[in-house]
Structure formats: C-alpha cells, structure tokens
Image (cartoon, rainbow, N blue to C red):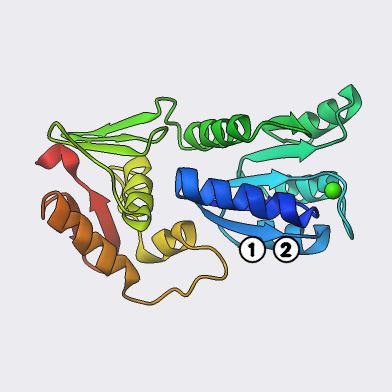
Amino acid sequence: MRVLIIEDEQRLARNIARVLTEVSSYAVDVSLDGEDGQHMSCSESYDLIILDLMLPKRSGLDILRAIRKKGLRTPVLILTARDTTEDIIQGLDLGCDDYLSKPFDMGELIARCKALIRRSYDRPNPVIRVGVLEINTASREVCFAGKVHILPAMEYRLLAYLAVRSGEVVSKEDILDHLYDFDSERFSNVVEVYISSLRRRFDPALIRTVRSQGYVLRGDKL
Ligand code: CA
C-alpha cells in the first residue's frame, strides 16, 4: 500500500511517514506544499491521502476538490488544526472520507488509515483469508497452514497487496506503483525477487504467474 502525506509541518510529516512505514509497512511519499501535493495526488497511484488544510501555495480543500473532479476514488483523510464544525462539513461535502483534528494520537491516526484502506478495497475484515493463507493487516501476522510468520517488510507489503486483490491478475507495473514510494529505486526485477522469496517461504504454487499479464495469489488452490 502506498500513502501520500500532504503536510507543510515537516517534522510532523516525517514522523507520520516513519510510523506508517514501520508499523504498517506502507510505502509513503511526503509533499510539503499544496501545489506539489495536488500534482502528486493526481499523477501517482495512492491507496490513501493524508491531507492538511492550511498549506502554502494551495489549500487542502482546493486539492480535495481537484482530486474528486478528476474522478479519483482515493480515500482522503483530512488532518488539520482547523477543527470547526464548518470545516468538517465542508471537507466531507467535498468528498473527504475521514477527519482528524490536531493535536491527535498517532495510534488513532494509523488505525483510521488502515480502516480507510480496508474499506476502499471492500475488505471490512482486517483478517484476509485466501485458502490456507491468513493475513492479519492489523497485526501484520501471516498465518500459513496454521503456522504464524512475521515477514520482512517488503515481502509483507507485496503479499498484503496481492491478498487484497486476490482472485485478480495484478500487473508488475501495478505492484510497483503500490509498493514503492517516489524516491525508491525501482529495479526492474525487484518484483520477481520478492515473488520468489514468498514462493520459497510458503509454497511454489501460492503465487501464479500469468504470462505477460502479471501475478495472481492462489492460496485457495493449495
Ligand atoms: Ca499546515
């Protein structure tokens, strides 16, 4: 999963990014002003956008308006010190999905982020079951044939993404877009490397390659 934080308080933005990466294994991009934030949110593939309202160059509400006008369904959580009722109503009316006022509790923010992403993939249950595979997206525990595994971050990130898309063929480009932040180097064989690790760890048949299309998680076929 990949998250964009549009927030001009640099320390706060970096802190949220660090926690989201460490706790939830998300890829995270940070944008420090409104103009760049709008560009990033409309040109990259995000699973969630955390949006401040008072930003240099362009307001958060203008960015939200632009995102929805473009038809993007990305969940948006507004995170702002402007906590008057009118701001909340305006944000919700413009198409934001959730709202948290500063100061906030980091644990609550992370929990809300996870819930928004779950809902956007139509996966209300934090535990995703695909045959003998069970992924707890709240605790990051992976259970395979009754045995619990804690995976390295990138393997977990890939498996969790394939799990929310289970049954679908997911292209390599799609995987790269949702697993890597803007600054990371996307080596062309990196997806194959992690797919191989997952197959070795669990079962060679867990992830099927569909030639020139992508990959499909097949835990139900084991
Ligand atoms: Ca601000």
Residue 150: where, in percent of width, then height?
28, 44
Which quadrant holds residue 101?
A: top right
Q: Residue at 51% of width from left, 31% of height from top?
A: 119
Of the pair 116 and 12, the residue shown nearer to us = 12
In the image, is the residue at mark 2 within 8 Å of ligand 1 by its beta carbon? no
Is label 1 in contact with label 2 (beta carbons under 8 Å)?
yes
Residue 105: where, in percent of width, then height?
67, 31
Give the amino acid type for the residue marked by disc 1 in the picture.
Ser
Q: CA–CA distance between discs 1 and 2?
A: 6 Å
- Asked if residue 201 is positioned above or below residue 94 in the image, the reply reads below
**Label 2: how many Cα within 10 Å (few below 14, some 14–19, many 20+):** some
Pointer 1 residue = 43
**Label 1: how many Cα within 10 Å (few below 14, some 14–19, many 20+):** few
The quarter of the picture where the C terminus appears is top left
The numbered disc on residue 39 is 2
Residue lying at the far top of the rendered structure: 85
The numbered disc on residue 9 is none
Q: Residue at 40% of width from left, 29% of height from top?
A: 126
User: Mark 1: which secondary structure?
Assistant: helix
Residue 161: where, in percent of width, then height?
38, 48
In the image, is the residue at mark 1 within 8 Å of ligand 1 by its beta carbon? no
Give the amino acid type for the residue marked by disc 2 in the picture.
His
